[in-house]
Amino acid sequence: MKSAWIILSALVAGMLLGIGIEGVSPSAAQASLPFVEPFGTLWLNALKMTIIPLIVALLITGITATADAARAGALAARAVMTFLGAIFLSGLMSLIMTPLLIELFPLSAEAAAALRHGLGGTAQTAPSPTFGDFLLSLIPTNPIAAAAETAVLPLIVFTTIFAFAITRIGEAQRTLLSNLFKALGDAMLVVIGWVLALAPFGVFALGYALAVKAGVAAFGGLVHYVLIVSGIGVCCVVLGLLLAWLAVGVPLPRFVRAMVPTLAVAISTQSSLACLPAMLQASAELGVPPKKADIVLPLAVALFRFTSTAMNLAVVVYIAWLFGIGLTPWTMAVGLAVAMAAALSSVSLPGSISYVTSIAPIAVSMGVPVAPLGLLVAVETFPDIFRTIGNVVGDVAATKFAADRVDDAPAEGVSP
């Protein structure tokens, strides 16, 4: 939380300085850009260099961990299937609601153009690929070349197939490969941690450049982005409550009463893990046997974040709209699949890291620029509140749903 506020403060400081210098001397502001903007670009490049190895490592460890969890017993398997169904529904909702919210609450053309210009892009009208082109792009003839060319979609297809193949080999070999890619992922997380430690400086430079190029209108554009993505977070909370009522069968007043302490912890900490004790109490009040809750809730915290697919897709769809990139139905289907895989792969990471590692693969697979993420991560502090609220609502609802449909929890559960 502290680092998130520092990054946000760096963004605001950079933008205020840029606006101030631009107001006093436009020529001096423009002359300063070649000296300031490269520092932001350099930081962005350092952030981008971690994406491909992280995609491979986190996807493999996420799939193998999910498969191992599903083997732990009927309750764990039911919980994993519940998680997958829930993040699919939330992602589908986002693909419908994000364009609708943008249409209902439009950003002025001047502010959109200013924000787009400040983020270093112009509206794009590239021709959409045919369905045949899309199918041919799914299977890489050379996975190493796909990685080198940042062709994320075929790389993800190969990595997913490889990860499922790992789950079918002997236990010793499976453990060896899983540990290898976990070590790779852990090492890359150290690297991205170093890069994000420099985020205040990089974001300051990017914010300064944005303000010089776009002026005060840039603030309006960022506020609009925050409101749209936060709106999808609110939609996730509403969807979670509706699923608790219609699918789980818990009356809404009873569910909300049980969740009040958990929601208070979620708002104050913005951490699903910190909410675990409160979620256990809420599950008990909803009639979930402690033996079952002790299995499903830690599994949910480790593998399941109800809002990730929806809100990550909302970010990518917003950037696509801002840059005038048309999204075809199969492009959105690919984005949904990648968003689900990314959600399972990086849910245990800190917010600023998971923002990059989860959204960048989706953006690349949908043909959307990644560069804006380096700036948008600075304002993630506000949407993250709704991410946590929606996640804890989904965790408790999923726990109740899975527990009610399995008679007896296995003696050997999944350890937290």
Image (spheres, rainbow, N blue to C red):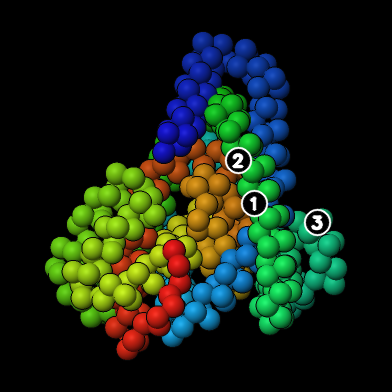
**Separation of marks 1 and 3 at Cα, in angstroms:** 24 Å
Helix, strand or loop under label 3: loop
123 relative to 19 in the view: left or right: right
Upstream in sequence: badge 2 or badge 3 = 3
Furthest-bottom residue in this view: 407
Verify CB contact (< 8 Å) between mark 2 and mark 3.
Answer: no
Instruction: State which quarter of the image contains the C terminus.
Output: bottom left
Residue at point 46%, 83% (across, down): 73
**Separation of marks 1 and 2 at Cα, in angstroms:** 10 Å
Residue holding disc 2: 193
Disc 2 residue type (three-letter): Gly
Crowding around mark 3 (Cα neighbors within 10 Å: few <14, some 14 to 19, many 20+) is few
Camera-nearest label, 1 or 3: 1
Residue 392 in the image: state x and y as whole percent.
Answer: 33, 60
Disc 1 residue type (three-letter): Asp
Residue at point 21%, 76% (across, down): 287
226 relative to 354 in the view: left or right: left
Residue holding disc 1: 186
Residue holding disc 3: 149
